Image: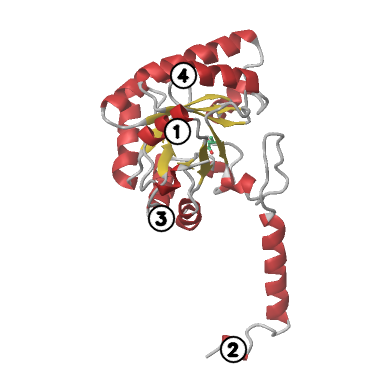
């Protein structure tokens, strides 16, 4: 299958074409220069500077504490590494929910201070006016429906969302509203595969799934989960491609041992 690897820069238009042509979109999170450089170099389509940085970079229990300044720091680091991927940055909790004017101001700060290509925000009908305002300013917006972690205290758990008819119906309506408002794509997190498939078919913009089955137009994973940096997190939807926790632990244990035994540095490792 041909891919868009040969394309110089991925844009929101590239993603639309990929959906039209049936090519799946591969998206991963990144929060720093070094990993973003590796992901961009191997042909990842989209890099998400997710507010999951709050969990995996800062060690918070939820995504709520991370600030706009902190997201800008992560996003600017990622952007310095990227030559080809589309970089999307999360608007953190508390920087867009009050009103569309606040949402636009936050989105503008991200675009101006990081050089990112798009922003993402969580929610459906509640954020539609904000999406319209941001899009009208020329900023591409990605939506996020289903399990929206910024609402964790309302949900109470990280369980699968929209299993009941009423929530599934609202999600379908919200997806159409976000598309009408100008979103270029929507993340669908932890919803039944059948519902995600129906939503994906009903839209002309691409859907990117995480725990939402194979019928989404693309997939996203948090880099720490995909690389196995924390082996205690193993949700059903995750495919772990590496056991980095084990590899790093073994490497650093060996280093400690080599330092203690004066095996390191040896003759060829000194001046
Ligand atoms: O913040 C994040 O990493 C995300 C993904 C889980 C989609 O929003």
For label 1, the crowd category at 10 Å Cα-Cα, with few meaning under 14, some 14 to 19 and many 20 or more, is some
Q: Nearer the viewer, mark 1 or mark 3?
A: 1
Instruction: State the SS at label 4.
Output: loop
**Does mark 1 have its CB less than 8 Å from ligand 1?**
no
Question: In this orientation, does residue 151 appear?
Answer: yes
Q: Are marks 1 and 4 in contact (CB under 8 Å)?
A: no
Q: Mark 1 and mark 4: span between their CA atoms?
A: 14 Å
Instruction: State the SS at label 1.
Output: helix
Q: Position of residue 202 (x, y in %)?
A: 49, 15
Report whether 266 appears left or right of 21: right
Q: Mark 1 and mark 3: span between their CA atoms?
A: 24 Å
Instruction: State the SS at label 3.
Output: loop
Of the numbered discs 1 and 3, the one sitting upstream in the chain is 1
Q: Mark 4 and mark 3: span between their CA atoms?
A: 32 Å
Q: Which residue is mark 1?
A: 18
Quadrant in the picture for residue 134:
top left
Where is 39 relative to 116, above or below?
Answer: below
Q: Nearer the viewer, mark 4 or mark 2?
A: 4
Q: Are marks 2 and 1 in contact (CB under 8 Å)?
A: no
Of the numbered discs 2 and 1, the one sitting upstream in the chain is 1
Q: Which residue is mark 4?
A: 203
Q: Nearer the viewer, mark 4 or mark 3?
A: 4
Report whether 90 appears left or right of 147: left
For label 4, the crowd category at 10 Å Cα-Cα, with few meaning under 14, some 14 to 19 and many 20 or more, is some
Question: In this orientation, does residue 192 appear?
Answer: no
- Residue 220 numbered tag: none
Of the numbered discs 4 and 3, the one sitting upstream in the chain is 3
The residue shown at (64%, 19%) is 194
Q: Which residue is mark 2?
A: 268
Report whether 113 appears left or right of 218: left
């Amino acid at each position: 299958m041909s891919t868009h690897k040969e394309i110089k820069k991925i844009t929101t238009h590239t993603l639309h074409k990929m959906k039209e042509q049936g090519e799946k979109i591969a998206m991963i999170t990144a929060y720093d220069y070094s990993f973003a450089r590796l992901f961009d170099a191997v042909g990842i389509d989209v890099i998400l500077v997710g507010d999951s940085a709050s969990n995996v970079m800062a060690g918070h229990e939820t995504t709520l504490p991370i600030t706009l300044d902190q997201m800008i720091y992560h996003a600017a680091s990622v952007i310095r590494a990227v030559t080809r991927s589309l970089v999307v940055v999360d608007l953190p909790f508390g920087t867009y929910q009050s009103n569309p004017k606040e949402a636009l101001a936050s989105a503008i700060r991200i675009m101006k201070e990081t050089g990112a290509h798009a922003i993402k925000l969580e929610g459906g009908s509640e954020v539609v006016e904000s999406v319209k305002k941001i899009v009208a300013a020329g900023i591409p917006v990605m939506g996020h429906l289903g399990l929206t972690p910024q609402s964790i205290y309302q949900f109470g758990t990280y369980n699968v969302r929209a299993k009941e008819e009423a929530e599934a119906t609202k999600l379908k309506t919200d997806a159409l509203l976000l598309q009408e408002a100008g979103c270029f794509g929507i993340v669908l997190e932890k919803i039944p595969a059948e519902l995600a498939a129906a939503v994906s078919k009903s839209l002309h913009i691409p859907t990117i799934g995480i725990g939402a089955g194979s019928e989404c137009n693309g997939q996203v994973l948090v880099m720490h989960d995909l690389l196995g940096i924390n082996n205690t997190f193993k949700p059903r939807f995750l495919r772990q491609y590496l056991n980095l926790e084990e590899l790093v632990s073994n490497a650093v244990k060996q280093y400690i041992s080599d330092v203690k035994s004066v095996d390191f540095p040896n003759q060829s490792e000194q001046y």
